[in-house]
Protein backbone atom coordinates (compact mmCIF):
# COMPACT_ATOMS: atom_id res chain seq x y z
CA UNK A 1 0.00 0.00 0.00
CA UNK A 2 1.10 3.56 -0.61
CA UNK A 3 -0.20 7.09 -0.32
CA UNK A 4 -1.35 8.67 -3.56
CA UNK A 5 -1.59 12.34 -4.46
CA UNK A 6 -5.09 13.73 -4.06
CA UNK A 7 -6.01 15.77 -7.13
CA UNK A 8 -7.28 19.27 -6.35
CA UNK A 9 -9.74 21.35 -8.37
CA UNK A 10 -9.40 22.45 -11.16
CA UNK A 11 -7.45 19.34 -12.15
CA UNK A 12 -9.40 18.20 -15.25
CA UNK A 13 -9.50 14.54 -14.19
CA UNK A 14 -12.07 15.53 -11.58
CA UNK A 15 -14.46 16.36 -14.43
CA UNK A 16 -14.02 13.03 -16.23
CA UNK A 17 -16.42 10.12 -15.92
CA UNK A 18 -14.87 6.96 -14.52
CA UNK A 19 -15.04 3.65 -16.38
CA UNK A 20 -16.86 0.55 -15.13
CA UNK A 21 -14.55 -2.05 -13.58
CA UNK A 22 -14.82 -5.26 -15.62
CA UNK A 23 -13.19 -7.58 -13.09
CA UNK A 24 -12.24 -7.12 -9.45
CA UNK A 25 -8.63 -8.31 -9.56
CA UNK A 26 -5.44 -7.66 -7.61
CA UNK A 27 -4.81 -4.43 -9.51
CA UNK A 28 -8.22 -3.05 -8.50
CA UNK A 29 -7.72 -4.24 -4.93
CA UNK A 30 -4.32 -2.56 -4.84
CA UNK A 31 -5.82 0.72 -6.02
CA UNK A 32 -8.57 0.45 -3.41
CA UNK A 33 -6.10 -0.25 -0.60
CA UNK A 34 -4.03 2.77 -1.64
CA UNK A 35 -7.21 4.83 -1.61
CA UNK A 36 -8.12 3.67 1.90
CA UNK A 37 -4.68 4.60 3.18
CA UNK A 38 -4.71 7.96 1.37
CA UNK A 39 -8.23 8.78 2.59
CA UNK A 40 -7.44 7.94 6.21
CA UNK A 41 -4.17 9.89 6.11
CA UNK A 42 -6.08 12.94 4.86
CA UNK A 43 -8.84 12.54 7.44
CA UNK A 44 -11.52 12.03 4.81
CA UNK A 45 -14.83 10.19 4.98
CA UNK A 46 -14.81 9.15 1.33
CA UNK A 47 -12.60 9.07 -1.74
CA UNK A 48 -13.26 8.34 -5.42
CA UNK A 49 -10.67 6.87 -7.77
CA UNK A 50 -10.43 9.90 -10.05
CA UNK A 51 -9.42 11.94 -6.99
CA UNK A 52 -6.16 9.98 -7.03
CA UNK A 53 -5.80 9.94 -10.81
CA UNK A 54 -7.46 6.62 -11.71
CA UNK A 55 -10.50 6.64 -14.00
CA UNK A 56 -12.16 3.56 -12.53
CA UNK A 57 -15.45 3.29 -10.67
CA UNK A 58 -13.93 2.60 -7.27
CA UNK A 59 -14.85 4.36 -4.02
CA UNK A 60 -13.65 4.03 -0.45
CA UNK A 61 -15.60 5.13 2.64
CA UNK A 62 -14.65 5.33 6.30
CA UNK A 63 -17.53 6.64 8.39
CA UNK A 64 -16.84 8.14 11.83
CA UNK A 65 -17.09 5.53 14.57
CA UNK A 66 -16.42 2.61 12.23
CA UNK A 67 -13.32 0.54 12.93
CA UNK A 68 -12.26 0.32 9.29
CA UNK A 69 -13.15 1.60 5.87
CA UNK A 70 -14.99 -0.19 3.08
CA UNK A 71 -14.35 -0.62 -0.64
CA UNK A 72 -17.08 -0.06 -3.22
CA UNK A 73 -16.55 -1.17 -6.82
CA UNK A 74 -19.03 0.02 -9.45
CA UNK A 75 -21.36 1.63 -6.88
CA UNK A 76 -24.86 2.47 -8.13
CA UNK A 77 -27.60 4.47 -6.47
CA UNK A 78 -30.87 2.67 -7.17
CA UNK A 79 -33.35 4.87 -5.33
CA UNK A 80 -33.55 7.91 -3.05
CA UNK A 81 -36.10 9.25 -0.59
CA UNK A 82 -36.53 12.62 1.08
CA UNK A 83 -34.30 15.65 1.01
CA UNK A 84 -32.28 17.65 3.53
CA UNK A 85 -29.73 20.45 3.54
CA UNK A 86 -26.27 19.47 4.77
CA UNK A 87 -22.83 21.02 5.10
CA UNK A 88 -20.39 19.29 2.79
CA UNK A 89 -16.66 19.41 2.11
CA UNK A 90 -14.27 17.63 -0.22
CA UNK A 91 -10.62 16.55 -0.19
CA UNK A 92 -10.33 17.97 -3.72
CA UNK A 93 -11.54 21.40 -2.52
CA UNK A 94 -9.54 21.60 0.71
CA UNK A 95 -10.39 24.21 3.32
CA UNK A 96 -13.91 24.97 2.08
CA UNK A 97 -17.41 23.76 2.77
CA UNK A 98 -20.82 24.40 1.28
CA UNK A 99 -24.51 23.89 1.91
CA UNK A 100 -26.10 21.42 -0.50
CA UNK A 101 -29.22 19.28 -0.70
CA UNK A 102 -28.85 15.52 -0.29
CA UNK A 103 -31.28 12.61 0.01
CA UNK A 104 -32.34 11.38 3.44
CA UNK A 105 -32.35 7.73 2.38
CA UNK A 106 -30.32 6.12 -0.40
CA UNK A 107 -30.63 2.58 -1.73
CA UNK A 108 -27.39 1.48 -3.37
CA UNK A 109 -25.48 -1.55 -4.56
CA UNK A 110 -21.86 -2.34 -5.41
CA UNK A 111 -19.21 -5.06 -5.48
CA UNK A 112 -16.81 -5.47 -2.57
CA UNK A 113 -13.09 -6.19 -2.87
CA UNK A 114 -13.86 -9.88 -3.44
CA UNK A 115 -16.38 -9.23 -6.19
CA UNK A 116 -19.36 -10.07 -3.97
CA UNK A 117 -22.60 -8.13 -4.49
CA UNK A 118 -23.59 -5.74 -1.69
CA UNK A 119 -26.95 -3.98 -1.31
CA UNK A 120 -27.69 -1.37 1.36
CA UNK A 121 -30.30 1.13 2.46
CA UNK A 122 -28.29 4.04 3.86
CA UNK A 123 -29.31 7.04 5.93
CA UNK A 124 -27.71 10.21 7.31
CA UNK A 125 -23.96 10.57 6.63
CA UNK A 126 -23.75 7.19 4.91
CA UNK A 127 -26.38 8.26 2.37
CA UNK A 128 -24.72 11.65 1.93
CA UNK A 129 -21.30 10.08 1.36
CA UNK A 130 -22.67 7.64 -1.21
CA UNK A 131 -24.22 10.45 -3.25
CA UNK A 132 -21.09 12.60 -2.95
CA UNK A 133 -18.72 9.84 -4.11
CA UNK A 134 -20.93 8.55 -6.94
CA UNK A 135 -21.08 12.16 -8.13
CA UNK A 136 -17.27 12.16 -8.23
CA UNK A 137 -17.28 9.05 -10.43
CA UNK A 138 -19.50 10.95 -12.87
CA UNK A 139 -17.30 14.06 -12.92
CA UNK A 140 -19.60 16.04 -10.62
CA UNK A 141 -18.39 18.10 -7.64
CA UNK A 142 -20.51 19.11 -4.68
CA UNK A 143 -20.14 22.77 -5.64
CA UNK A 144 -22.23 21.95 -8.72
CA UNK A 145 -25.17 21.46 -6.35
CA UNK A 146 -24.94 24.89 -4.77
CA UNK A 147 -28.25 26.67 -5.23
CA UNK A 148 -26.98 30.02 -4.05
CA UNK A 149 -23.74 31.83 -4.78
CA UNK A 150 -23.07 32.51 -1.09
CA UNK A 151 -23.41 28.92 0.13
CA UNK A 152 -19.71 28.11 -0.16
CA UNK A 153 -17.20 29.43 2.35
CA UNK A 154 -13.95 28.74 4.10
CA UNK A 155 -14.54 25.90 6.54
CA UNK A 156 -15.94 27.13 9.84
CA UNK A 157 -16.54 30.71 8.67
CA UNK A 158 -19.42 32.85 7.50
CA UNK A 159 -18.96 34.91 4.35
CA UNK A 160 -19.71 38.62 4.64
CA UNK A 161 -21.95 40.01 1.91
CA UNK A 162 -19.98 41.09 -1.14
CA UNK A 163 -16.75 39.37 -0.09
CA UNK A 164 -15.07 36.99 -2.55
CA UNK A 165 -15.05 33.33 -1.59
CA UNK A 166 -14.28 29.98 -3.19
CA UNK A 167 -17.18 30.31 -5.64
CA UNK A 168 -15.20 33.31 -6.92
CA UNK A 169 -11.52 33.34 -7.82
CA UNK A 170 -9.61 36.55 -7.27
CA UNK A 171 -7.49 37.61 -10.26
CA UNK A 172 -5.11 40.49 -10.86
CA UNK A 173 -5.01 41.92 -14.38
CA UNK A 174 -2.24 44.18 -15.71
CA UNK A 175 -3.77 46.30 -18.49
CA UNK A 176 -1.52 48.27 -20.83
CA UNK A 177 -2.85 51.62 -22.06
CA UNK A 178 -0.28 52.31 -24.80
CA UNK A 179 -0.93 51.15 -28.36
CA UNK A 180 2.62 50.77 -29.69
CA UNK A 181 5.16 47.98 -29.32
CA UNK A 182 7.40 49.81 -26.85
CA UNK A 183 7.65 48.67 -23.27
CA UNK A 184 5.00 50.53 -21.26
CA UNK A 185 5.98 52.76 -18.38
CA UNK A 186 4.68 52.04 -14.91
CA UNK A 187 2.09 54.80 -15.25
CA UNK A 188 0.72 53.19 -18.43
CA UNK A 189 -0.10 49.90 -16.71
CA UNK A 190 -3.30 49.69 -14.71
CA UNK A 191 -3.71 46.92 -12.15
CA UNK A 192 -7.29 45.72 -11.97
CA UNK A 193 -8.56 43.32 -9.32
CA UNK A 194 -11.56 41.24 -10.25
CA UNK A 195 -13.26 37.93 -9.48
CA UNK A 196 -14.11 35.06 -11.80
CA UNK A 197 -16.75 32.40 -11.16
CA UNK A 198 -16.07 28.67 -11.46
CA UNK A 199 -18.07 28.69 -14.71
CA UNK A 200 -15.48 31.02 -16.25
CA UNK A 201 -12.52 28.80 -15.38
CA UNK A 202 -11.01 25.84 -17.13
CA UNK A 203 -7.84 23.81 -16.81
CA UNK A 204 -5.80 22.04 -19.48
CA UNK A 205 -3.86 19.71 -17.22
CA UNK A 206 -3.21 20.82 -13.65
CA UNK A 207 -3.59 23.53 -11.05
CA UNK A 208 -0.20 24.96 -12.01
CA UNK A 209 -1.18 25.27 -15.67
CA UNK A 210 -4.78 26.40 -15.29
CA UNK A 211 -6.02 29.23 -17.48
CA UNK A 212 -8.93 31.62 -17.16
CA UNK A 213 -11.55 32.26 -19.80
CA UNK A 214 -12.04 35.99 -19.23
CA UNK A 215 -14.38 36.71 -22.12
CA UNK A 216 -17.49 36.61 -19.95
CA UNK A 217 -15.77 38.96 -17.52
CA UNK A 218 -15.19 41.53 -20.30
CA UNK A 219 -11.60 40.65 -21.23
CA UNK A 220 -9.91 38.79 -24.07
CA UNK A 221 -6.88 36.59 -23.41
CA UNK A 222 -4.60 35.92 -26.38
CA UNK A 223 -2.18 33.98 -24.19
CA UNK A 224 -1.78 32.98 -20.58
CA UNK A 225 0.47 35.98 -19.88
CA UNK A 226 -1.14 38.74 -21.97
CA UNK A 227 -4.52 40.19 -21.07
CA UNK A 228 -6.03 43.15 -22.94
CA UNK A 229 -9.08 45.17 -22.04
CA UNK A 230 -12.15 44.74 -24.23
CA UNK A 231 -14.56 46.94 -22.29
CA UNK A 232 -14.57 49.92 -19.93
CA UNK A 233 -12.69 48.87 -16.79
CA UNK A 234 -14.50 51.18 -14.40
Image: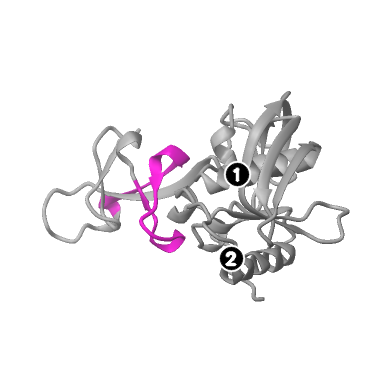
Mark 1, residue position: 134
Q: Which mark is residue 28?
A: 2
Relative vertical location of residue 231 with respect to residue 89 in this rendering, above or below: above
Quadrant assignment for the N terminus: bottom right
Query: Who's the residue at 78% across and 41% down the image?
Result: 125
Give SS at disc 1. helix
Of 200 and 157, nearer the camera is 200
User: x, y (%) of residue 191?
Assistant: 37, 49
User: x, y (%) of residue 14?
Assistant: 49, 52
Q: Can residue 168 be found in the magenta stretch?
A: no
Residue 197 at least partly seen:
no
Give SS at disc 2. helix
Residue 105 at least partly seen:
yes
Relative vertical location of residue 10 with respect to residue 3 in this rendering, above or below: above
Closer mark to the observer between disc 2 and disc 1: 2
Q: Residues within 10 Å of mark 1 (few under 14, many from 20)?
A: many
User: x, y (%) of residue 9?
Assistant: 51, 53
Q: Can residue 205 be found in the magenta stretch?
A: yes
Query: Who's the residue at 45% across and 50% down the image?
Result: 16
Which quadrant of the view contains residue 40? bottom right
> What is the number of callouts on the image?
2
- Image side of residue 40 versus residue 227, left or right: right
Q: Residues within 10 Å of mark 2 (few under 14, many from 20)?
A: some
3D distance between C-alphas at marks 2 and 1: 17 Å
Mark with earlier residue (2, 1): 2
Of 132 and 234, nearer the camera is 132
State the extent of the magenta-drawn residues as a range: 187-212
Amino acid sequence: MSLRQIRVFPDPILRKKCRTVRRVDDKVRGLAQDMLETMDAAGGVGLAANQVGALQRVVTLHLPGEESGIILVNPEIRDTQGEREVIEGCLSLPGYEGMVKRSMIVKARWLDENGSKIKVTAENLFAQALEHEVDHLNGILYVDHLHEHEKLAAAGTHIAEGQPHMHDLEVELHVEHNNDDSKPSESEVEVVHSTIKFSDLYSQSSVDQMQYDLRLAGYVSDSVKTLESETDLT
